[in-house]
Amino acid sequence: MSASTAARSLQDRITTAAQGPALRHLDTLSRSPLYAPAVTALLETEMALSEQRRAGDRLLRSLTGRRSTYQRRVDQERADRVALDASRASLRRPPAVWWHESGTGAPIMLVNGWTASGLLWPSHLVRALDRTHRVIRVDNRGTGYARTAPSPYTIATMADDVADVLKASTNGPAVVVGLSMGGMIAQEVALRHPKLVTALVLVGTRPPAPVHIPASPDVLGRALDRPGPDEPKDAFVASVWTSFCAPGFGERRPDLVAELVGQVLARATPQVAVNTQLRAIAAWHGPERLRKLALPTVVVHGTADRLMPVGNGMRLAQLIPGATYVELPDVGHLVPMEASETLADVVLGLA
């Protein structure tokens, strides 16, 4: 079997797992000393092959003037970016992803989780931070204004994207705050680019495989649901996202839920990106590397987090030397929305 065939075969199996009952096997397999490294190796092979295909598409376009469907999407996204901020089009080497920024002062980088772009941070949290600091919110590959960024990719790829954004926007170190998958990316940024990180805030996230504690398949499967044929999109999005909050939060704060729904639908994440990010998460491994981290780190976790069980935060705090652990009673997975004041205090205490 060729490398490309092997990579495609594995991609198909993981994509199938992300869409059906086999989902429960992903975490089991990721605990194998062979599985996660093998997924990483095959993803990296597929990344190289995908770049060759993109180079071929570019050559064909230059020779014939014809654009593929993918290239039309890329061109449209580029136009959308220019409409937001034309000055970034002049960057000598722009990052593969987009970012949003506000405020002035020492930088704070916010990295969101699985399926979520930089748009999905509560406005009241952003305001609390950008009164005194420059707040940068990155769109991970596949989300926001980075929906056509090259794929596939790994957690390490997305960490390099964050580093590129920091270099392009501030050229200096920042406090890096990561939620869920964003917390995994934040750990990789600190490991791969330590000079760019002054401190870490790891929120509702987990350590690398194989020491993580998985969510139950029904909880993870809820994130992969699709709306019914007659179900309004806003009601569906509200139902899915509030299922990750502590019980009753959605009823208590409908205003915050409405803002979140608007942020999700403003630039919805395509299903292919949802699955691609899931593959990146499945490939992430190597908890022993966290012993190398030597920077102020705070781990924040809600006790009612069903998507990322609270034991993950405890283990993470034990693995990172000198890390502080902050546990939030009766708070679910969406800490930035459910406990924004506490999170702002933690971040500003490090910034």
Image (cartoon, helix red, strand yellow):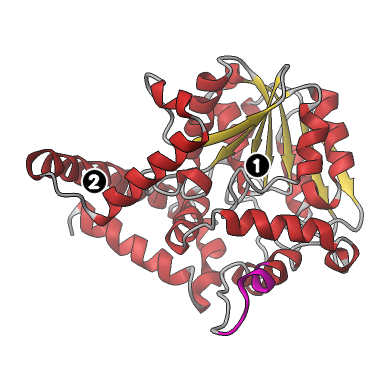
Residue 56 appears in the picture as rendered: yes
Quarter placement of the C terminus = top right
Q: Number of numbered discs present? A: 2
Tell me, for residue 49, which label it has, or none: 2
Q: Earlier in the sequence, mark 2 or mark 1?
A: 2
Tell me, for residue 228, which label it has, or none: none
Main SS, magenta region, reads helix
Percent of width and height locating residue 68: 22, 53
The kind of residue on which mark 1 rests is: Gly
Near-viewer residue (252 or 258): 258
Question: Within the image, what quadrant is residue 153 found in?
Answer: top left
Q: Is residue 138 magenta?
A: no
**Local crowd size for mark 2, using a 10 Å CA cut-off: few (<14), some (14–19), many (≥20):** some
**Local crowd size for mark 1, using a 10 Å CA cut-off: few (<14), some (14–19), many (≥20):** many
Magenta span: 230-237
Q: Write down the residue under mark 1.
A: 183
Percent of width and height locating residue 54: 23, 44
Task: Identify the residue at image location x=27%, y=48%.
Answer: 71
